[in-house]
Amino acid sequence: MRPEILFPLFAPVTSLKGVGSRLAPLLERLAGPIVRDVLFLKPHAIVRRTPAVLSAVRDGEVMTFEVTIEEHQRPRAQSQPWRVRVSDPTGFMTLVFFGRFADQLESRHPVGAKRIISGKVGDDKFGRQMVHPDYMVDPAKAGEIPELETIYPATEGLPPRRVRGFVLEALERAPALPEWQDAAWKAREHFPAWREALERLHAPESEADLSPLTPHYRRLAYDELLAHQLAMAQRKAERRREPAAKIAAGAIAEKVRADLPFVFTGAQARSLGEIRADLASGERMSRLIQGDVGSGKTVVAMCAMADVAAGGGQSALMAPTEILARQHFETISGPLNDHGVGVVLLTGRDKGKPRAEKLRALAAGEAKVAVGTHALFQDDVAFHRLQLAVIDEQHRFGVAERQRLQAKGQAVHLIAMSATPIPRTLELTVYGDLDVSRIDEKPPGRTPVATRAVPMGRIAEVEARLRQATAEGAQAFWICPLVSESEVSDLAAAERRAADLTERIGPSVGLIHGKLPPAAKDAVMAEFAEGRLSVLVATTVVEVGVNVPNATIMVIEQAERFGLAQLHQLRGRVGRGRQESACVLLYDPPLSETAQRRLDILRRTDDGFVIAERDLELRGGGDALGLRQSGFPDYVFADPFAHRDLIAAAGDDARLIINRDPDLTSERGKGLRVLQELFDWKAGMALKDAG
Ligand code: ADP
Ligand code: MG
């Protein structure tokens, strides 16, 4: 239940004076549907209305003058504006008015009257002028002009000054709320009270007050982060309270592991250790394994599945695509079968009798591991005793899908896997309700991929090199980006590229894209994997963990359009064996400085975690698009870069709160409930969690 004190903030924007059916949709688009959203708009600039003299006009600036009305110049034609000539002792200026009310100007501002005018001035070949002054008042009413005015985001039909008016009204409606910050922390950080922080935000005293580093701004950011962290900590605690099967580390997994033709890296061993500690704890595990493509996540999960099987339980490994599910099946079924653990593969392609037989084996508990796609959580799939769900590329699944799989057993342990590296500082905001294991070490014997950026103008050279390499037996991926709004034209571009390459290289060029039916996709992929195709032109489907060890060349067209993380993942498709591999980043010049630096980062390192960290620094919190793609929440105040120190603090704070006052019944706890309602981060909500 929402506390009554918040009602005014949760009223629709139409409750603000002057917001009717015409403005409401505009304001909603700009801010959101309720008064709180208007209150949470942030000013991005300040205008000072300190008076100047006309001779000091600076083109393009907002300026203020005290002038005398000299002359009204009526328009000679309908389409022309009304002009008013004004002066001060230093010179003249023309005010320009369009629209049908212009003719009232003469009576309201008669010749000879003194006025204070303020607005954006132009000083160019048309002379000095001001089009539609923001203010034009009698000097006796100069007080109506704020000396310092905040500028808010605006939209067609809703100018910044109207927005400002609505924000200030929302501020008036904002109640003082009970304090939810820890007193000592609040004092240490010099945080003002919540309402005071908003007053400072909306009534800054200088440009410096707009900085995200000011105490009042940091307070608002911290509030937001804390609300979110608290919701995630509650979820995590709830899950932990569910008793789950205790699963011991067993001999079978050790044998499976000993049979592998390699030894675990330190990071793999550590991750398996963390998983085993969770499984043995009697609490339900929710753990994310984060690691680059090819870092060996799947084999770690395989050992956990062997432990579960040894205890008589079942596991399900779910992948987002058929190709991936098949590869996982190939990786794990051999080693597991060798030690008596039955594995079935279940995808959308299974039909009729064979499918019925697989379902029977799962329901009877004969098969201990199911590998598959979305087919795994369909209603007619039942397990005998499902104890562990492993979800690969977890962000490719919706919360509901992940939950449907986990609902096939009781208090099912969860391992989520992700190859999208997130900077450590942001981990809590994306995966705060999970425990995280990082595989930050590559299996030995991989040769780094030589990475070059090449302008599109030199594509012929790239093609010639490719022809030579494929003649010598090499295989290559050629990635065409999805760039336009229309999939159709992107597809056409990929088809054209495939045709071009066929002309230059020969018939061994294949094409794979998202619109192909799964069976056709698999067929092309299989041809490539078996070496019958030497070049695979693809839209980004290969992004998801497909493994073709013989492929050593990766060409990425319009590389500047991809996020760093995505480029890194694409590049991870090659360089998986001992052969030298190459990655060519084709770009359309000229490159912006940032694009240049991003491609440089990629050339210098192949550690996904380092790349994610540098990418964040480069953005400096600016362009949040890539971050959002990697799951960073759409915060109002909190900035991933400027407030990175607050993220960790909010995480600690939330954990402490949940330990001491799990039901939020203390005095501070009551305040925290208001905070959660205020930001809508509630425990029950479907957050970006893994179910
Ligand atoms: P991920 O799931 O992280 O993409 P996989 O577990 O599929 O990675 O491993 C990628 C490839 O590397 C597989 O062929 C696997 O057998 C191999 N591999 C995994 N761990 C090691 C290791 N420690 N040493 C050598 N090869 C390894
Ligand atoms: Mg993988």
Image (spheres, grey):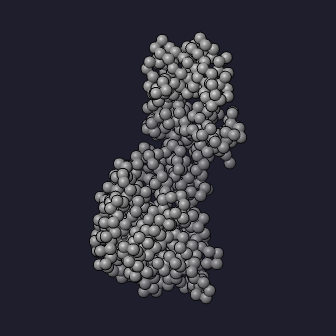
Q: Residue 465 occupies which quadrant of the picture?
A: bottom left
Please report the residue visible at 43 percent of the width from the left and 81 percent of the height from the top. Answer: 527
In front of the other: 404 or 3: 404
Please report the residue visible at 61 percent of the width from the left and 88 percent of the height from the top. Answer: 353
Q: Residue 112 occupies which quadrant of the picture?
A: top right
Q: Residue 505 occupies which quadrant of the picture?
A: bottom left
In front of the other: 544 or 261: 544
In front of the other: 61 or 289: 61
* Residue 630 position within the rendered picture, expressed as x and y whole percent measured from the top left: 47, 57
Please report the residue visible at 47 percent of the width from the left and 72 percent of the height from the top. Answer: 512
Q: Taking the image as drawn, is residue 531 in sight?
A: yes
* Residue 190 position within the rendered picture, expressed as x and y whole percent measured from the top left: 46, 34
* Residue 114 position within the rendered picture, expressed as x and y whole percent measured from the top left: 57, 13
In the rendered view, tell whether residue 53 sits above or below residue 407: above
Seen from this angle, which residue lies furthest right?
21
Quadrant in which the C terminus appears: bottom right
In the rendered view, tell whether residue 44 sits above or below residue 147: below
* Residue 640 position within the rendered picture, expressed as x and y whole percent measured from the top left: 45, 48
Please report the residue visible at 62 percent of the width from the left and 38 percent of the height from the top. Answer: 157
